[in-house]
Image: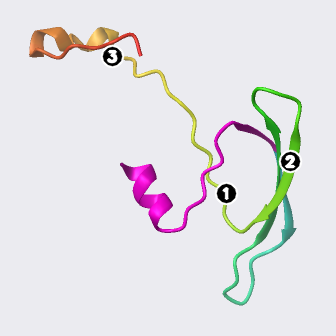
Amino acid sequence: MIGEHMAEHGVRFLRGWVPTGVKLIEEAKDGKAPRLLVSSKQSNGDQLWEEEFNTVVFAIGRDPCTADLKLEKAGVQCSEK
């Protein structure tokens, strides 16, 4: 839901790409955002891609680490995913 909300408000998500570098082209100044060159590689191929942005946010998956929380005692059922 958060991702959908962000996309509706102009945030562009690039899925299926692995960032290989972020280079500062121009520092932020006079109220303007910085200019950043992002280099990426296609996650399931060899295609390379670069584009300029003013903001970059990285998000990665995370292991939920729920095994020791005894969630089953609270009636919570967990899947393998």
Label 3, on which residue? Answer: 66
Q: Earlier in the sequence, mark 3 or mark 1?
A: 1
- The alpha-carbon separation of the residues under discs 3 and 1 comes to 30 Å
Q: Is residue 26 covered in magenta?
A: no
- The alpha-carbon separation of the residues under discs 1 and 2 comes to 15 Å
- Please give the name of the residue rendered at 40% of the width and 59% of the height, measured from the top-left corner: 5
Q: Residue furthest left?
A: 74
Label 2, on which residue? Answer: 49
Q: Which residues are magenta?
A: 1-20
Mark 3 burial class by Cα count in 10 Å: few <14, some 14-19, many 20+:
few
Q: Earlier in the sequence, mark 3 or mark 2?
A: 2
- Please give the name of the residue rendered at 33% of the width and 16% of the height, measured from the top-left corner: 66
Label 1, on which residue? Answer: 56
Q: Is residue 31 left or right of residue 63?
A: right
Residue 49, compared with residue 7, is above or below; it is above
Q: Is residue 19 covered in magenta?
A: yes
Foreground mark, 1 or 2, reads 2
Residue 29, compared with residue 56, is above or below; it is below
Q: Foreground residue, 52 or 35? A: 52
Provide the secondary structure element on which disc 1 rests. Answer: loop
Which amino acid type corresponds to the residue marked 3 in the rendered image?
Thr
Which amino acid type corresponds to the residue marked 2 in the rendered image?
Trp
- Please give the name of the residue rendered at 11% of the width and 9% of the height, measured from the top-left corner: 73
- Please give the name of the residue rendered at 66% of the width and 87% of the height, measured from the top-left corner: 31
